[in-house]
């Protein structure tokens, strides 16, 4: 005769209807992400040895996250491996942008080791290239892991140019179809988002385009797939923008601040 516990167990098992939902893939993706970062940046990490471990781990991830019977995802690794030097070159340019933009940076080593904005960019670039090969779950898990660690939420589908600088990082959101060109600086709390959310917009550009040499200060919100921030513009803190901005513009959100001396 079934006990109350048996009935509860049976009800839980009945509701576990997704055969592909294996939380192990999340844990192994986080391990893979850390291994990638160490392989590219840590002086004491032996690249050849780690590449072999990465390949084995990636094969494990394919078995967990590529649900097509013929497993076409297994062909991705070699192609991804070939572009890792190019990704590292871009990240080194990003690190230099941090040194040039932040007066509090004492050394390039400090940027690599201590800056959450740099880490978020690194994991974005590593996940973005992997996404191009048609394996969406792993890149998304990579950037969500980075999001949890840094407070910076960059969708791996976003397109970001060279020498990107993120200061502080906390609260930044960059949507899937956002386009950010070269030499852009973004401060904490900035959102590059959509005007509204609806499933029918799945294949539509929903997020802004930011042209070259733009600076966006803290807590600015820029929305809409048709919104373009023109080159060489500066967006002030707390600005709310839903329409395009011409190049060489300065946008400010000025509020009257009253100071009263209390006697």
Image (cartoon, rainbow, N blue to C red):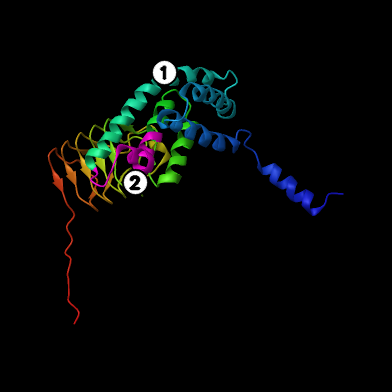
Q: Residue furthest front?
A: 44
Confirm whether the magenta stretch covers residue 112: yes
Residue at disc 1, secondary structure = helix
Can you tell which mark lies on residue 82? 1
Side of 206 relative to 69 (left or right): left
Residue at disc 2, secondary structure = loop
Instruction: Tell me which residue sits at (41%, 24%) in the image.
Output: 132
Q: Residue 237 appears at what percent x and percent y?
A: 23, 52
Q: Which residue is the site of mark 2?
A: 169
Crowd around label 2: few <14 · some 14–19 · many ≥20 (10 Å): many
**Which of these two is toward me, 99 or 230?**
99
Confirm whether the magenta stretch covers residue 37: no
Side of 57 relative to 245 (left or right): right
Compared to residue 161, the image places residue 254 above or below, namely below
Extent of the magenta region: 102-123
Can you tell which mark lies on residue 114? none
Upstream in the sequence, badge 1 or badge 2?
A: 1
Q: Residue 196 appears at what percent x and percent y?
A: 35, 45
């Amino acid at each position: 005769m079934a006990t109350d516990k048996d009935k509860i167990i049976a009800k839980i098992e009945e509701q576990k209807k997704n055969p592909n939902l294996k939380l192990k893939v999340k844990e192994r993706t986080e391990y893979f992400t850390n291994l990638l970062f160490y392989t590219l940046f840590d002086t004491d990490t032996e690249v050849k040895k780690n590449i072999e471990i990465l390949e084995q781990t990636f094969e494990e991830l394919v078995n967990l996250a590529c649900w097509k019977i013929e497993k076409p995802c297994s062909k991705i690794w070699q192609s991804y491996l070939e572009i890792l030097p190019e990704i590292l070159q871009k990240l080194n340019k990003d690190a230099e942008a941090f040194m040039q933009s932040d007066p509090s940076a004492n050394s390039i080593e400090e940027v690599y080791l201590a800056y959450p904005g740099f880490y978020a960019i690194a994991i974005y670039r590593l996940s973005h290239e992997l996404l191009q090969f048609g394996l969406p779950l792993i890149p998304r898990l990579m950037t969500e892991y980075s999001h949890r660690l840094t407070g910076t939420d960059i969708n791996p589908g976003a397109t970001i140019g060279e020498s990107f600088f993120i200061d502080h990082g906390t609260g930044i959101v960059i949507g899937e179809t956002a386009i950010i060109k070269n030499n852009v600086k973004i401060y904490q709390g900035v959102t590059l988002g959509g005007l509204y959310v609806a499933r029918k917009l799945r294949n539509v550009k929903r997020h802004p385009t930011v042209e070259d040499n733009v600076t966006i200060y803290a807590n600015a919100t820029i929305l809409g797939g048709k919104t373009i921030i023109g080159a060489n513009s500066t967006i002030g803190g707390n600005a709310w923008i839903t329409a395009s901005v011409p190049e060489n513009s300065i946008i400010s959100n000025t509020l009257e601040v009253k100071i009263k001396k209390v006697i």
